[in-house]
Amino acid sequence: MSHPPTLHSPLKVAVVGTGYVGLGTAALLAYFGHQVVGLDIDQDKVAMLRRGELPIYEPGLGELMAVCGDRLRWTDDYASAIPDADVIFICVGTPPLPGGQPDLRYLAAAAQDVARNLNGKMQVVVNKSTVPVGTGDWVTRIIEEHAPDYKAHQYNVVSNPEFLREGTALFDSLYPDRLVLGGNNEHGVARLLELYAPLIEQDFEAPAHVPRPAGYTRPEVVATSLSSAEMIKYAANAFLALKISFANEIAGLCERVDADIEEVVRGIGSDTRIGRQFLSAGAGWGGSCFGKDTSALISTGEEYGYDMPILRAAVTINLRQRQLIVAKLQKHLHRLQGKRVAVLGMAFKPNTDDLRDAPAHDTIARLNELGATVVAHDPVAMERARREWGHLKYVEAESAGAALVGADAVILMTEWKQYAELDWNEAVKTMRQPVVIDARNVLRGGLPGGTLERIGRRGQSQPQPQSGPALHLKPEATK
Ligand SMILES: NC(=O)c1ccc[n+]([C@@H]2O[C@H](COP(=O)([O-])OP(=O)(O)OC[C@H]3O[C@@H](n4cnc5c(N)ncnc54)[C@H](O)[C@@H]3O)[C@@H](O)[C@H]2O)c1
Ligand SMILES: O=c1ccn([C@@H]2O[C@H](COP(=O)(O)OP(=O)(O)O[C@H]3O[C@H](CO)[C@@H](O)[C@H](O)[C@H]3O)[C@@H](O)[C@H]2O)c(=O)[nH]1
């Protein structure tokens, strides 16, 4: 493991909320040499972190934290974290309310507790949570109301939205495309530039387990107004979600006209104006952000009497995509009552145990409704599913191979590397009916002795003779 940089002016940082974003922020800043305290009201989380355990599965994060030593500590006590901090990041959750708007109660509570513990000496409050435009000003007002030593304009909140992806949080944090800093608090923005200097200059030794990619130089610093920074975060996620829905819509047409979405995407994505990323057709997007943030943007539009038809369509296509998976199953198995269906992958994407808005949830729920017996497996999310998916009926499988034994069909829901690397030609021989629904377009080639359905690609509706071409991996699936 490599060593962190020697900072000329380490700052004291408090990170409020130790979810994916809070942990990523705390680890990054401590790695850069700052003194960081992570604060959470969830005492179990704090106890785990103090024991050196991670409450989430995020590759490489534990290793990075381990080299930070006593530059990184954890607390549930605002009074021990806030008064000493030069910079305070708010990273609490903003989950969706039933109407689509974000629930800002955690943010309000955190802002009040931060305010009550400020020391009146030019501390900088930074919002990293994803919030609707105008929220930063609202947080400033909360601080004005609750900070005992408030001085006019001193605490104007700075917005520093986060763009990390779960599963690759460290890579995204160490080598970001851009750093967005929004606000009219000159002192605050200057402090953030100082805090992020190692990142902006790329003046740190890359950790051995997250090497700097070839050709990467430094992030672009995008300085904006507070409102623009808040809007950038939503617009970025909405655009990525839109790209995926576009690919899925075209994939549906490909199936009907006998074209192949993978070839089409390669063809359009090689145009640099379009780009190849986020055009993988499949079960659609899930996770804690895309669904929540597209809904939040649509509901902000509604607040202003402004319709957002493109975004509404992206959401509709995403829902349709989830239904498509079971429809493909019905095409081969017809009535699903009493059929045994293996589901490989529960998390919303590989390399995370996050189950929020995972497409697998809706698939299992629908299979439950239709009376199928579900056998499910995930390399890391099984335990979390036990806690969070108690309302679903499924049998846990010990391994992917075990899930397939005696099954009438298998749905590959999450493109975990180990699923792609299964010896599929052998595995399907253990099934009662060798029907494979590849909902992430990971498997290539034919499936001798089996029936393969994919998204937007020519499938293989009948078992092929054993002499047919064997399956091999899509190259990206092994990265
Ligand atoms: N998950 C991601 O990949 C990601 C990426 C970019 C941005 N975001 C945004 O960042 C924010 C945080 O997301 P997350 O996924 O890290 O959330 P999370 O739900 O994983 O974690 C939030 C944490 O905040 C804590 N918390 C709640 N109220 C608190 C309070 N008053 N004081 C202290 N701690 C409190 C919770 O106990 C929890 O540990 C959200 O707005 C999200 O949209 C998330
Ligand atoms: O071509 C693609 C790419 C992704 N997905 C799906 O889209 C979802 C989201 O994937 P990804 O964006 O990789 O993960 P997140 O961790 O949700 O990250 C998104 O949401 C975060 C929270 O706001 C942002 O910070 C990130 O920049 C943004 O990429 C997952 O279900 C993926 O399976 C596809 O279906 N096709």
Image (cartoon, rainbow, N blue to C red):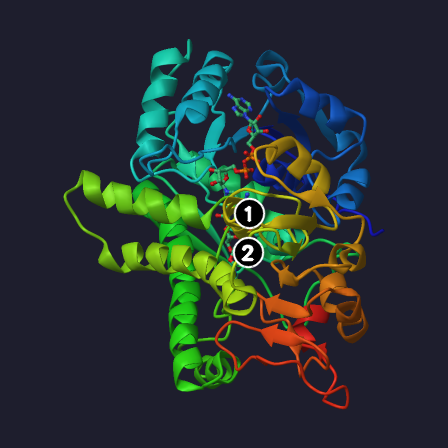
Horizontal arrangement in the rendering, residue 404 relative to residue 347 (left or right): right
Q: Residue at x 72, y 68 (%)?
A: 420
Quarter of the picture holding the C terminus = bottom right
Density class for disc 1 (Cα within 10 Å; few <14, some 14-19, many ≥20) is: some
Quarter of the image where one finds residue 171:
bottom right
Image location (x, y in percent) of residue 224: 35, 49
Horizontal arrangement in the rendering, residue 154 relative to residue 41 (left or right): left
Above or below: residue 421 compared with residue 139: below
Quarter of the image where one finds residue 390:
top right
Element under disc 2: loop
Residue to which mark 1 is pinned: 371
Amino acid on which the number 1 mark rests in the picture: Gly
Above or below: residue 200 compared with residue 98: below
Horizontal arrangement in the rendering, residue 191 relative to residue 198 (left or right): left
Q: Nearer the viewer, residue 244 or 147?
A: 244
Above or below: residue 381 compared with residue 91: below
Image location (x, y in percent) of residue 336: 55, 56
Q: Nearer the viewer, residue 30 or 279?
A: 279
Horizontal arrangement in the rendering, residue 203 relative to residue 321 (left or right): right
- N-terminal of the pair, mark 1 or mark 2, is 2
The answer to whether marks 1 and 2 mark residues whose Cβ atoms lie closer than 8 Å is yes
Question: Extreme top residue here?
Answer: 148
Question: Extreme left residue here?
Answer: 305
Q: Residue at x 48, y 29 (%)?
A: 124
Image location (x, y in percent) of residue 186: 39, 38
Amino acid on which the number 2 mark rests in the picture: Leu
Q: Residue at x 68, y 35 (%)?
A: 386
User: How far, Cα to Cα, is label 1 from label 2?
Assistant: 6 Å
Total count of labels:
2
Q: Which mark is residue 336?
A: 2
Q: Which mark is residue 159?
A: none
Res 344 seen here: no
